[in-house]
Image (spheres, helix red, strand yellow):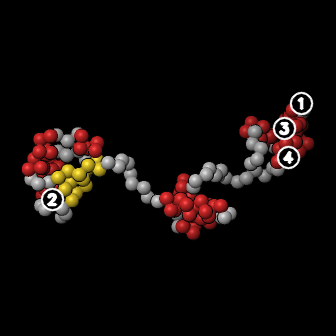
């Protein structure tokens, strides 16, 4: 029993009666604009006669679970060099949430095990006409990895 109720379904005569039965002291019904627009004028007039006002909630969508201060805290921790896993455990949230809330893009996953020098050598050999199979044999890197590095042009990983 309360004087305020929030509805998430369109107001129908059946729903209004249920709400009034459960809340005899009802003074206000909160509902999103989209539901208010779909409510019949007859129901709105009847509620007004009963002294029940309709409060239209302007904000749309699900309320935010995390505030901006948490985002700032995550960014500060990242800048100080802490890993995503460490931040997640300290803040008692999931790693996925840390990736979601961070300000700048972070690349998930491990860093490439091949140095910039090795990658540049792969590109130079390819540009000089060396077949991928020969590059693979010379540098002892799997052919598939050579293709991946060439395809993604992922210098600076």
Q: Residues within 10 Å of mark 4 (few under 14, many from 20)?
A: some
- Contact between marks 1 and 3 (CB within 8 A): the answer is no
- Tell me which label, 1 or 4, sits earlier in the chain: 4
Front of the two marks 2 and 3: 2
In the rendered image, residue 137, in percent from the top left (x then y), is placed at 89, 41
Indicate the secondary structure of the residue bearing disc 4. Answer: helix
Residue at 55 percent of width and 60 percent of height: 72
- Tell me which label, 4 or 3, sits earlier in the chain: 4
Q: CA distance from mark 1 to mark 4?
A: 17 Å
Query: Foreground: 57 or 62?
Result: 57
Indicate the secondary structure of the residue bearing disc 1. Answer: loop
- Contact between marks 1 and 2 (CB within 8 A): the answer is no
Indicate the secondary structure of the residue bearing disc 3. Answer: helix
Mark seen at residue 118: 4
In the rendered image, residue 70, in percent from the top left (x then y), is placed at 51, 62
Residue at 23 percent of width and 39 percent of height: 38
- Mark 3 — residue? 123
- Mark 1 — residue? 129
- Mark 2 — residue? 26
- Contact between marks 1 and 4 (CB within 8 A): the answer is no
Residue at 80 percent of width and 40 percent of height: 146
Front of the two marks 4 and 2: 2
Tell whether 78 sits left or right of 57.
right
Tell whether 141 sits left or right of 102.
right
């Amino acid at each position: 029993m309360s004087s305020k109720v929030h509805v998430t379904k369109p107001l129908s005569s059946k729903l209004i009666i249920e709400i009034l039965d459960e809340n005899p002291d009802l003074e206000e019904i909160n509902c999103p604009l989209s539901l208010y627009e779909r409510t019949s004028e007859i129901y709105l007039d009847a509620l007004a006669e009963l002294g029940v006002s309709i409060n239209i909630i302007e904000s749309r969508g699900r309320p935010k679970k995390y505030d901006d201060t948490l985002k700032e805290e995550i960014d500060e921790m990242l800048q100080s060099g802490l890993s995503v896993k460490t931040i997640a455990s300290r803040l008692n949230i999931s790693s996925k949430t840390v990736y979601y809330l961070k300000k700048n893009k972070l690349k998930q996953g491990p860093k490439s095990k091949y140095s910039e020098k090795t990658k540049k050598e792969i590109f130079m050999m390819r540009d000089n006409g060396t077949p991928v199979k020969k590059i693979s044999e010379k540098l002892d890197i799997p052919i598939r990895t050579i293709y991946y590095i060439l395809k993604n042009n992922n210098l600076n990983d």
